[in-house]
Image: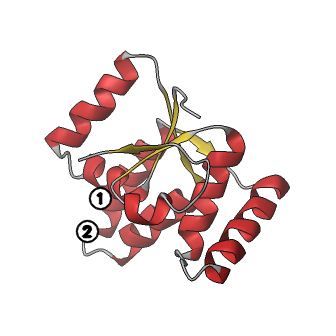
Amino acid sequence: METNRVVIDTDILIDLLRNTTKVVDSLSEMEAKGYSLATTIINAFELFHGAYKSKKREKNLASTTTLLERLIILKMGLTSAQNAGRIYAELETEGQPIGLRDAIIGAIALTKGYSLATRNVEHFQKIKGLNLIPIP
């Protein structure tokens, strides 16, 4: 399923916070094309976790908050939770596990009909039906 609604994964969000030109340009292009940019509550957690651990805590917390306020934040409902549980269990059973947070992020995007912009293609390609947008 290809969509103009995109969840931005944590690795890409970090590059945005670092003002990495290639990533900023890619996402600016998506915005110009009318893409709806979002992230999940799990990605927000990962960013805040990193900001609280950083040496420049206050600056990074402020930057993280400013970035997240510009995005749609997708939450995890019961259907997303069920899908995440299924995905996580299936991949474990197949001997292809991915991290729990990645399973949840992928399930939220899939359940809500969003593509996922990420550099972590290796993990997320294991989730059947999830449309990935690799970001260099």
Q: Which residue is mark 2?
A: 56
Furthest-right residue in this view = 78
Q: Amino acid at mark 1?
A: Lys
Color style of the picture: secondary structure
Query: On the picture, is 67 further left or further right than 128?
Result: left
Task: Determine crowd level at label 2: few under 14, some 14-19, many 20+ residues with C-alpha closer than 10 A.
Answer: few
In screen coordinates, is 44 left or right of 14?
Answer: right
Is the residue 133 above or below the residue 76 in the image? Answer: above
* Residue at screen point 30% across, 74% down: 54
Tag 1 residue: 59
Instruction: Determine whether the residue tagged by mark 2 lies in a helix, strand or loop.
Output: loop
For the residues labelled 1 and 2, the Cα–Cα distance comes to 6 Å
Residue 49 in which image quadrant? bottom left
| Point 58% across, 56% down: residue | 106
- Contact (Cβ within 8 Å) of mark 1 with mark 2: yes
Residue type at tag 2 = Lys
Name the quadrant of the N terminus: top right
Residue 78, x across and y down, in percent: 84, 57
Give the side of residue 108 with respect to residue 7, left or right: right
